[in-house]
Amino acid sequence: KNEVEQSPQNLTAQEGEFITINCSYSVGISALHWLQQHPGGGIVSLFMLSSGKKKHGRLIATINIQEKHSSLHITASHPRDSAVYICAVRLYNFNKFYFGSGTKLNVKP
Amino acid sequence: DTEVTQTPKHLVMGMTNKKSLKCEQHMGHRAMYWYKQKAKKPPELMFVYSYEKLSINESVPSRFSPECPNSSLLNLHLHALQPEDSALYLCASSQGTTGLNYGYTFGSGTRLTVV
C-alpha cells in the first residue's frame, strides 16, 4: 500500500472549469507539498502546507490534518495548467518525502 | 537567488564512461537531495546530505557516488552505468533537516541517457 494516494490519476477538463485533485496519506507528517511538473521538466513547488488553507492566484490548497487529506483546486483552468500535479508528504523528524503517483491534468481550449 | 541549478540539462553517456552531475544553490540551505525519476513515475529519493554529511542512502548501487564539497554544491558521480539508469535526475535543497521545513526547492533536472 502506498503511503500517499492521489486521485484521479488522469483528468481532462475544458478551459474555465474548476478542478480538484485529492491526496490522502497514512503516515504522520510535518508538511505536505503540492508540486507541479511539466512534461520533460523539473518540479516546481506550488504549496507547502502544515494546516489550513493557502491561496496563490487561481490555485488553492487545503489540508485536514485529522482526516489526513489534502486537496488542490484550480479555478478558471487554462491550457497552460496542463501538467502533472504531485502530492508529497514529509515525515516528521525524517529527511524524506513520500510522493503520490501524480495526477496528469490536460486542460483543453 | 532562489534557485537550484543543475548542470548539464542533458547527458548521453556510454556504459564505460565516467561523468558527473552538478547541483548548486546559494540560498543557504543545509540539506540537499538527489532523486531519480523514471518516465511517468514519481521521484525516488537516492541520497540526502545534511550539513555536508551523507545522512540517507536509499540502497543506491555503488555506480552512483554522491559528493558534497561544500554547503552550496552537490555532485553525483556516475561510473559504469546501465541503460536502465537512464532517467531524469533531480536535485533539491531545503533550509532545515527535520520537522517543519521551508523553502524546499527542486532543480529542473538532468536528463540522462545511458547507451
Image (cartoon, rainbow, N blue to C red):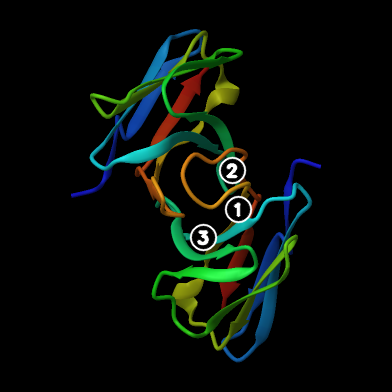
Residues tagged 1 and 3 counted as in contact (Cβ below 8 A): yes
Please state which amino acid type lies under the numbered disc 3. Tyr
Please state which amino acid type lies under the numbered disc 2. Tyr
Q: Residue beneath label 1, please? A: B92
Chain under disc 1? B
Who is closer to the viewer here, B19 or B48? B48
In-image side of A17 versus B5 (left or right): left
Alpha carbons under labels 2 and 1: distance apart: 7 Å
Find residue A78 and report its horizontal and vertical position in percent: 56, 16
Q: Residue placed farthest to the bottom in the image? A: B16
Q: Residue placed farthest to the right in the image? A: B1
In-image side of A54 versus A71 (left or right): right
Find residue B45 and report its horizontal and vertical position in percent: 45, 60
Q: Quadrant of the N terminus of chain B?
A: top right
Please state which amino acid type lies under the numbered disc 1. Ala
* Residue B35 numbered mark, or none: 3
At 60% across and 91% down in the image, what residue appears? Answer: B16
Who is closer to the viewer here, B87 or A108? B87
Q: Nearer the viewer, mark 2 or mark 3?
A: 2
Number of numbered markers: 3
**Lower position in the chain sequence, tag 1 or tag 3:** 3
Residues tagged 2 and 1 counted as in contact (Cβ below 8 A): yes
Q: Residues within 10 Å of mark 3 (few under 14, many from 20)?
A: some
In-image side of A39 versus B19 (left or right): left
Alpha carbons under labels 2 and 3: distance apart: 13 Å
| Quarter of the view holding residue B6 | bottom right
